Image (cartoon, grey):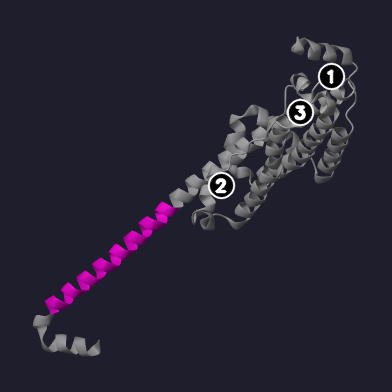
């Protein structure tokens, strides 16, 4: 470098070439910086959009889970009623209309899968991704019963009057397990939204029903929430019998005629 400067001093005609070289060098360097900035800016936008879509997906799954728990509990209560009126000659399939059939839980995972299949997940907060990963893992766990229930509905047990009681016992076990797991999982979702609340404030404001449910849990202390969940689980484990069994039986017979 010193030799180059010395030569430039000795031969001033080389200065234009030096400035030309310097201009080209700076142009290349600036072009590189601009390209890098554009790529980083593009990644930031893509990451922001991906996270927004994931927040929307998680929130929709939360809504679905709240509704699912409500529906499953109602079906479990009706199945408790059916237990006392199972009669010979009736297939369990005849009783399905009484409790409006089985309830399948459905969780969306398209946004989560897109993040997992790209490098965008690496650009998101680690804690957020780890917490979301736990949610989606349990989603799969809860959805395993969907296929099992469908298999039961089309199995020979369901259409054999001699095996009606067996089909009922299996069905009740599935529905009870759905209610039990759903009760646990809705806590996971609520705590996730509590922990990352800033991501869901707008979505909560736009949905008064879900916001009311979330707020009712958000104000609880950890001890109060634990007590509430234990009480809920005891409730699921010990449904009371409905005295209107004759009315239910008449509906079954009416559906066969």
Q: CA distance from mark 3 to mark 1?
A: 13 Å
Residue 3 appears left or right of 62: left
Q: Nearer the viewer, residue 225 or 99?
A: 99
Q: CA distance from mark 3 to mark 2?
A: 36 Å
Q: Nearer the viewer, residue 94 or 58?
A: 94
Task: Answer with the quarter of the image where residue 21 lies.
Answer: bottom left
Q: Quadrant of the C terminus?
A: top right
Pointer 2: what residue? 112
> Residue 158 shows which numbered tag?
3
> Residue 26 shows which numbered tag?
none
Q: Nearer the viewer, residue 9 or 45?
A: 45
Q: Nearer the viewer, residue 26 or 89?
A: 89
Q: Quadrant of the N terminus?
A: bottom left
The residue mark sitting in front, 3 or 2, is 3
Q: Mark 2 falls on what kind of element?
A: helix
Residue ID at (88%, 12%)? 246
Residue positioned most to the left = 13
């Amino acid at each position: 470098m010193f030799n180059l400067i010395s030569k430039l001093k000795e031969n001033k005609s080389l200065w234009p070439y030096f400035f030309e070289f310097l201009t080209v060098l700076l142009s290349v360097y600036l072009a590189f910086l601009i390209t890098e900035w554009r790529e980083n800016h593009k990644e930031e936008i893509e990451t922001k959009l991906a996270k927004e879509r994931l927040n929307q997906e998680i929130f929709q799954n939360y809504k679905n889970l709240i509704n699912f728990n409500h529906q499953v509990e109602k079906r479990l209560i009706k199945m408790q009623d059916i237990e006392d009126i199972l009669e010979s000659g009736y297939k369990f399939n005849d009783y399905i209309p009484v409790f409006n059939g089985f309830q399948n839980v459905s969780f969306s995972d398209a946004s989560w899968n897109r993040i997992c299949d790209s490098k965008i997940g690496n650009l998101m907060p680690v804690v957020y991704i780890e917490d979301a990963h736990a949610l989606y893992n349990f989603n799969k766990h809860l959805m395993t019963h969907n296929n099992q229930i469908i298999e039961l509905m089309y199995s020979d047990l369901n259409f054999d009057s001699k095996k009606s009681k067996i089909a009922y016992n299996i069905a009740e076990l599935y529905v009870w397990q759905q209610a039990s797991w759903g009760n646990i999982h809705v806590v996971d979702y609520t705590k996730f939204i509590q922990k990352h609340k800033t991501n869901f404030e707008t979505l909560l404001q736009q949905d008064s029903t879900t916001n009311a449910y979330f707020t009712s849990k958000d104000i609880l202390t950890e001890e109060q929430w634990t007590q509430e969940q234990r009480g809920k689980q005891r409730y699921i484990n010990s449904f009371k019998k409905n005295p209107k069994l004759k009315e239910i039986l008449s509906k079954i017979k009416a559906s066969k005629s």
